[in-house]
């Protein structure tokens, strides 16, 4: 049986992890490779690296990091952040990334999804969508959820699938950082509309939230950052509990 | 031991190179006929779309070389699919090493299948030390229906073939290089054939 995936997300700046992490056993708390190895060993199913570097050196630094991760880590990983061209994607995939995630660049130029899917295959193209519920309507946002567009989440998700995305990473800006659970209603509706895997993001606070997003939200995977970084939830414990709730996970 | 990864511009081959390095071997990426012929083990990777991958193989003459290889050859994911007779994706004629076709998932489940699924009915030395129902990482939209060259099967709505063997040729639909310790163990088994 295909299992539900647990995906820790690491924010990267200038080749280092940004958000504080609370691993006492880390030699270097800012080293994404070391953290990635720990998560892989603890049973993470995949990893996401989100790059927020804004310097000229961005591309080179990120490609080097991807190469180091690929060298050490034996589970799949996705790289996102500032990717806007075929060339960007080519460099990352050639450095060893399994998938790339595009967000604002896809909204600005939807044709990019078609081009990337045709050149590299749908399986490695994740489209990340940040959305916020405003007056009862889910609206797509840009720049890390700061800038609203006029695009509706469910229309955009369908378009993204038709254009050849292999997966959707949906972050609810209403839930992100709240630790009150994932946007399960919107997730379940997404699942009924589209036929590609959906990664739930934003709102993880406890083990029950993960269970809910798989059962109620029908998510295929769940992504979280701080609950893992600060060891509020350990991946092994999480997966054991999910398994007890009858959710298929890789133990 | 000389391990060659066939380099024909198909997807993420760094991962396989690194996975082999973690096992203590150095793999060479090559599209050179002599180098591939003289290797002890050949890995035929592939990620992406079938017809364009086949075009790339043809442009370098690798399509005629691969079926004649006599050392152990391991096709991974699209590599395995291209070793079959025919791929529905892009209406592509394959290398005809495995006597089967590759067809698209046609059930109510999500496509592509992305994630960790179980392999079972394990046969062959490739899976020595691997337990039944071990999880492997898969990403694919097309599959091989059950046939008598199967050495592993997986269930995704239907039961299909997730690994194949014919003589010196092996193929896995899953990515051993991305499947944690168990995947590394399968790669090690292959290198020790």
Image (spheres, rainbow, N blue to C red):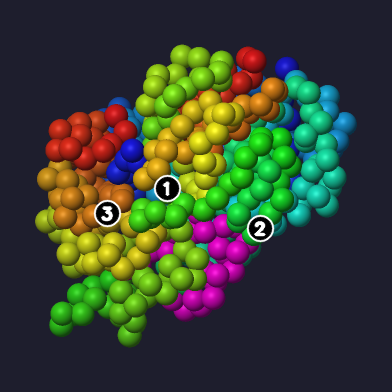
Q: In this view of the protein, which residue sits in the foreground, A40 or A118?
A: A118
Is B77 situated above or below B3? below
Confirm or deny contact between disc 1 and disc 2 (CB under 8 A).
Answer: no
Same subunit: marks 1 and 2: yes
Tell which tag, 1 or 2, sits nearer the viewer: 2
Q: Within the magenta stretch, is there residue B64?
A: no
Confirm or deny contact between disc 3 and disc 1 (CB under 8 A).
Answer: no
Is B76 situated above or below B42? below
Which residue lies most toward the bottom here? A150
Residue B140: image x %, image y %?
A: 50, 48
Q: Disc count in the image?
A: 3
Q: Within the magenta stretch, is there residue A109?
A: yes
Residue A137: image x %, image y %?
A: 21, 80
**Quadrant location of the N terminus of chain A in the rendered image:** top left
| Quarter assignment of residue A91 | bottom right
Residue that badge 1 annotates: B114
Identify the subunit bearing mark 2: B
- Mark sitting earlier along the chain (1/2): 2
Could you tell me how far apart the alpha carbons at marks 1 and 2 are, in whole angstroms? 23 Å
Tell which tag, 3 or 2, sits nearer the viewer: 2
């Amino acid at each position: 049986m295909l299992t539900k995936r647990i995906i820790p997300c690491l924010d990267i700046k200038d080749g280092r992890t940004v958000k504080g992490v609370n691993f006492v056993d880390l030699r270097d708390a800012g080293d994404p490779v070391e953290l990635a190895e720990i998560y892989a060993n603890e049973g993470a199913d995949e990893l996401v690296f989100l790059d927020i570097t804004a310097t000229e050196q961005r591309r080179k630094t990120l490609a080097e990091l991807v190469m180091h991760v690929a060298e050490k880590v034996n589970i799949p990983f996705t790289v996102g952040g500032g990717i806007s061209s075929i060339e960007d994607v080519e460099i990352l995939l050639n450095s060893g990334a399994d998938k790339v995630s595009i967000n604002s660049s896809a909204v600005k130029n939807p044709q990019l999804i078609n081009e990337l899917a045709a050149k590299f295959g749908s399986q490695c193209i994740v489209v990340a969508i940040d959305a916020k519920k405003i007056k009862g309507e889910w609206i797509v946002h840009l720049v890390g959820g700061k800038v609203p567009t006029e695009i509706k989440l469910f229309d955009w998700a369908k378009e993204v699938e038709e254009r050849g995305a292999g997966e959707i990473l949906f972050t609810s800006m209403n839930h992100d950082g709240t630790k009150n659970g994932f946007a399960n209603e919107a997730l379940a509706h997404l699942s009924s509309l589209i036929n590609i895997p959906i990664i739930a993001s934003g709102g993880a606070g406890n083990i029950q939230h993960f269970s809910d997003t798989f059962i109620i939200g029908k998510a295929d995977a769940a992504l979280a950052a701080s609950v893992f970084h600060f060891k509020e939830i350990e991946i092994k414990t999480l997966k054991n509990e999910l398994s007890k709730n009858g959710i298929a996970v890789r133990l | 031991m000389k391990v060659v990864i066939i380099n024909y511009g198909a997807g993420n081959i760094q991962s396989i190179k690194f996975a082999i390095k973690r096992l203590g071997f150095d793999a060479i990426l090559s599209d050179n006929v002599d180098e591939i012929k003289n290797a002890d083990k050949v890995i035929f990777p592939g990620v992406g779309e079938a017809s364009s991958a086949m075009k790339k193989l043809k442009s370098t003459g690798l399509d005629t070389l691969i079926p004649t290889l006599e050392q152990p050859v391991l096709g991974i994911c699209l590599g395995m699919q291209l070793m079959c007779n025919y791929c529905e994706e892009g209406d592509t004629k394959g290398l005809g090493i495995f006597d089967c076709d590759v067809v698209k998932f046609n059930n109510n489940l999500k496509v592509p299948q992305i994630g960790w699924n179980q392999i079972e009915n394990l046969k062959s030395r490739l899976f020595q030390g691997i337990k039944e129902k071990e999880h492997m990482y898969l990403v694919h939209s097309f599959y091989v229906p059950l046939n008598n060259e199967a050495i592993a099967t997986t269930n995704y709505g239907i039961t299909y073939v997730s690994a194949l063997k014919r003589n010196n040729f092996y193929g896995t639909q899953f990515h051993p290089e991305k499947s944690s310790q168990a995947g590394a163990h399968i790669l090690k088994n292959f290198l020790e054939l």
